[in-house]
Image: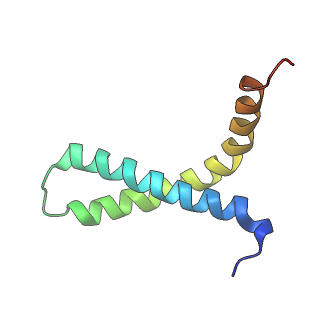
């Protein structure tokens, strides 16, 4: 079991992995359609995308939380 203090990092890791998998798959498919090397190219695109997505989510998530908190704050 992973300690709770690592929850935000694990969340960012999983979210960035799933989102980069989805986006790279759609982009690769739109470019290649049913090309025979689709899975190999998709895997390479996904891993490269995840390499950038994970640190981006780590930086963007706290900022997004602050923006959402301000946008949803009640005036009284």
Q: Nearer the viewer, residue 8 or 47?
A: 8
**Quick check: 76 left or right of 62?**
right
Q: Residue at x 22, y 43 (%)?
A: 30
Q: Residue at x 68, y 44 (%)?
A: 61
Give the number of marks: 0
**Quick check: 74 left or right of 45?**
right
Residue 66, picture quadrant: top right
Q: Looking at the figure, which quarter contains the N terminus?
A: bottom right
24 shown above or below 11: above
Q: Nearer the viewer, residue 56 or 69?
A: 69
Q: Residue at x 71, y 77 (%)?
A: 2
Rendered location of residue 41, percent (x, y): 28, 60
Rendered location of residue 74, percent (x, y): 80, 22
As drawn, the residue found furthest toward the bottom would be: 1
**Quick check: 73 left or right of 16?**
right
72 shown above or below 54: above
Please say whether residue 51 is visible from this viewpoint: no
Q: Looking at the figure, which quarter contains the C terminus?
A: top right
62 shown above or below 34: above
Rendered location of residue 75, percent (x, y): 84, 17
Residue 44, picture quadrant: bottom left
Q: Residue at x 38, y 47 (%)?
A: 23
Please say whether residue 65 is visible from this viewpoint: yes
As drawn, the residue found furthest toward the right would be: 76
């Amino acid at each position: 079991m992973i300690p709770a203090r690592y929850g935000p990092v694990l969340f960012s890791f999983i979210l960035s992995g799933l989102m980069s998998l989805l986006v790279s798959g759609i982009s690769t498919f739109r470019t290649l359609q049913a090309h025979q090397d689709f899975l190999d190219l998709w895997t390479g695109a996904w891993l490269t995308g995840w390499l950038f997505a994970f640190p981006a989510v780590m930086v963007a998530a706290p900022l997004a939380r602050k923006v959402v908190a301000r946008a949803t704050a009640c005036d009284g």
